[in-house]
Image: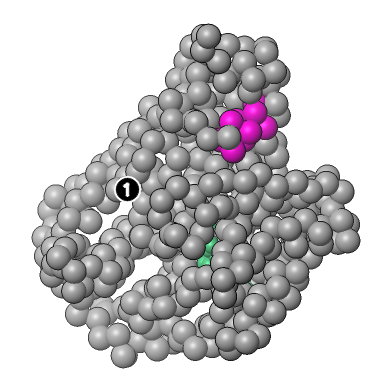
Amino acid sequence: MLVDPVVWVTDGKYTGQSLKLFEDVSQLYELLLARLEFHTWRNDLETFRWRTAYFAEVNGQRSYHWYIASVRGKGQIGYSSQYMTHWFYPYKGKFHGQMVKSLINFMGVTGDGIVLDPFLGSGTTLIECALLGVPSVGVEINPALCIVSQIKADCLFIDYPSLDTFLQSTSPQEVFHYFHQKPPSALRWVLQEDSGPWTGKRILDVAWSEHMPRGFVADLPFDWKNFLLLCYLHALSDYTYLKGTAKERPIQDFFLQDLREYAATLKGTWQILRAIQLNPKRPSVYLGDALHLPLPDESVDGIVTSPPYSIALDYIKNDEHLLNYLGIDASSLRERMVGLRGNRTDKLRLYEQDMHRAIAEMYRVLKPGAYAAIILGDVVVNSTRTNFCNRILTWAPQMGFRESVALRRPILGGYARLRYEYIIILRK
Ligand SMILES: C[S@@+](CC[C@H](N)C(=O)[O-])C[C@H]1O[C@@H](n2cnc3c(N)ncnc32)[C@H](O)[C@@H]1O
């Protein structure tokens, strides 16, 4: 007899005849998340159809996630990540949009609530919130990633036909040369922290008005020139990582190919969002510190985040090309980033101290009864598994969280030092 997972996920209420999981939902953690999201929305299947992350069909009709994930991005496997603008800019520490969506669903946050990601990275949480119509705020310490996240989210709102008219009448080589002419050494700039909050938009405004060359790209509408900038940054990253390998090519070749593929993604996104009548919600991006969140007490309805995984990844080294191109001073950044602070001997201790502080901050800004979901990899440092998941589960009740639980997600292939990630769910 074939076991029907939908029967288990829905506690026997439905079978695979009326609710269909995506065909690649096969891992235990995915079934657990499918179950969690279903149970929050089981009394409103019509809304569930447009919100669900793991169901391909609800009551015989395709889910919105089916349509959204059909706008396929580079490197996309199945329905879990890289769809729509998620694939823009190859940031190394991205997490999966589908998983984020299921967590927001489980938390039950709607258009009246607000979701926070205090370690925003390249903006995955904000894109999922935008597509769910949920207001969201992202906080990120690296201004370059504020730029990346802001542009990826803004690209969901671009009116593709107008942009297409411009692209058809413009030489892509000329666009490439505009960005490529920029001498990186002339670009050093500092963001004054005392002059009010720095949003992703404000950083981009300053970049365009004070640091990018005058000329035809600079005069384009804000969202278009940002789209082209991100495409150049993507090409720069491709070029940097493939230099010296068999796949090395001139940066211009990467740019021309990326531009074609970026444009195809925007076209698909525009078409699908119109077809399913989905109006995304604009998120807010803030340059800031997860250890001192620029938010009042009890002001957010849910948190979905993925902090740096211990001291495993050197986020600055990984994106040096991006920081250099944008003229951002990496040395002062390193001293403020979780997992990068300190020297070899005190790095791990400082990481633990910072994580404790970051989780206490999450507790402070969450509304009573609201959830935080923290995705964290179990990294080996000096031949020892760091197991910060267990430490967080120990801290949680001491900080005042009423419930805490962790799901384990195996990492298949890829980064050998990382065998599992944990999805830690805390309830205030
Ligand atoms: C694992 S990545 C997040 C990736 C993100 N979930 C995504 O999908 O792109 C962790 C991020 O935390 C940021 N970070 C490190 N220290 C921080 C701090 N003190 N405040 C805010 N962000 C910080 C890093 O710059 C990095 O982008």
Q: Quadrant of the rendered structure where residue 354 is?
A: bottom right
Q: Specify whether residue 34 is painted magenta.
A: yes
Q: Is residue 178 left or right of residue 361?
A: left
The kind of secondary structure the magenta stretch mainly shows is helix
Name the residue at 36% across, 74% down.
322
Image coords of residue 1 (percent x, y): 53, 9
Where ligand 1 lies, by quadrant?
Answer: bottom right
Q: Is residue 157 left or right of residue 169?
A: right
Residue beneath the point at 39% across and 73% down: 319
Name the residue rendered at 28%, 69% in the picture: 241
Q: Quadrant of residue 251?
A: bottom left
Disc 1 residue type (three-letter): Gly
Residue 177 lies, with reference to residue 92, above or below; the image says: below
Number of on-image labels: 1
Residue 13 visible, this angle: yes
- In magenta, the rendered stretch is 29-38
Q: SS for tag 1? A: loop
- The image position of residue 97, as x and y in percent, is 49, 45
* Rendering coords of residue 281 (x, y %): 54, 44
For this rendering, which residue is in front, 147 or 422? 422
Q: Quadrant of residue 212?
A: bottom left
- Seen from the viewer's position, the closer of residues 417 and 403 is 417
Q: How is the image coloured?
A: one colour
| Residue denoted by label 1 | 75
